Amino acid sequence: MSYDNHAPNSRFRSLIDRFGFPHLLSATLVLVAATILLGIAAKATGSGLACEANWPQCDAGPYNLLPGSLPSFYEWFHRFVAMFAGFAIIGSAIAAWRLPDVDRRIAGLVALGMVLTPVQVALGRETVQQYTIDILSLHFWTAVTIFTLFLVATVMVWTPRLTGTHVTGALALGIVALPAHVVLSPVVGSEISTYSPTMQMTQYGVTLTLLGAAIVAAMVGRRRVTGRALAPLLAAPPLVIAVLFFGRQAVNPALEGPYLVTAAALLVTFVAGVALTRGDDTSSGTTGARSR
């Protein structure tokens, strides 16, 4: 299935033809990830209630549209990038439904992400006006859901071009990223007295990397890998979600144990996946049979 060659019948189609639908989805995914990380930065630096609790305005400039201090800048820049991410999400959804050769499953994922976007915007407003733990948590997990929808859609678009080597590479990336996730977590204990904003933002960046690696390995692996090697690949994504959940709560000592257990299980899964898939070149012969 090709996403790069379409008969141009409008400026919109011409733009998509020029840059390609896969690249549009990839750019949208990057913007969604950037929005999440900037949101983490705003929360970690205590900037969520900056801008004098105004939304969508801030606390300086004409009509209070610009930031008046460094904390306000963190919150304002988060909103600024989120605005472009929202436009990209809407554009991706329109493109997915207007281009006839885009898989309807991909279009459905992107459309669901677009439906969740105004919900996320409303939750973002509530984090400024109410700032309760429940709203913050719901705001975060809605963002992760949107990210996951676009991540899956992006991988589906690129999967025909990916091989078993990419599966092994994704697993190897997970093996490298997971220890960094643990080191950056508050679970490390007495050696790190404070869970700094830089550590939080970096850890969540590593988390998104882990989620990407696990989903690439699982989705590409379904097409390129056979037999028992497929089991650890399919187990990786839910384990990453568990690591994210417990890692987010690991400032509570009672949840340090579950976090470390799930992290260890994920590491074993990644290592097993590499051991079972290494040297398994199924890039020819099985693609057509396993393509979905």
Image (cartoon, rainbow, N blue to C red):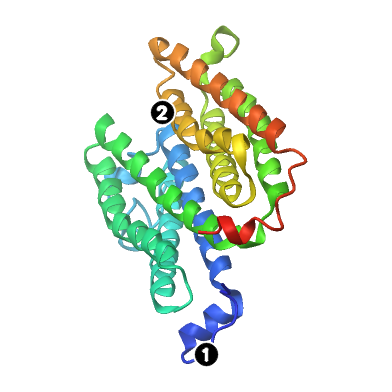
**What residue is rendered at 53% in x and 34% in y?**
236
Extreme residue in the left direction: 130
Indicate whether 243 appears above or below 143: above
Residue 69 visible in this rendered orientation of the protein: no
**What residue is rendered at 41% in x and 14% in y?**
255
On residue 249, the disc is: none
**What residue is rendered at 28% in x and 30% in y?**
133
Q: Which residue is mark 1?
A: 8
On residue 245, the disc is: 2
Viewer-nearest residue: 49 or 291: 291
Extreme residue in the top direction: 190
If you read the primary sequence from the N terminus, does the residue marked by circle 1 or circle 2 appear first? 1
Mark 2 belongs to which amino acid?
Answer: Phe
Q: Is residue 121 left or right of residue 270?
A: left
Q: Quadrant of residue 111?
A: bottom left
| Quadrant (top left, top right, bottom left, bottom right) of the N terminus | bottom right
Indicate whether 52 appears above or below 290: above
Mark 1 belongs to which amino acid?
Answer: Pro
Viewer-nearest residue: 43 or 17: 17
Q: Secondary structure at mark 1?
A: loop
Residue 93, percent from left and from top: 39, 68
> Label 1 crowding class (10 Å Cα cut-off): few <14, some 14-19, many 20+?
few
Rounded to the nearest whole Å, what is the CA distance between mark 1 and mark 2? 45 Å
Viewer-nearest residue: 84 or 210: 210
Q: Is residue 79 left or right of residue 212?
A: left
**What residue is rendered at 46% in x and 83% in y?**
12
Residue 174, percent from left and from top: 63, 34
Q: Are marks 1 and 2 in contact (CB under 8 Å)?
A: no
Q: Secondary structure at mark 2?
A: helix
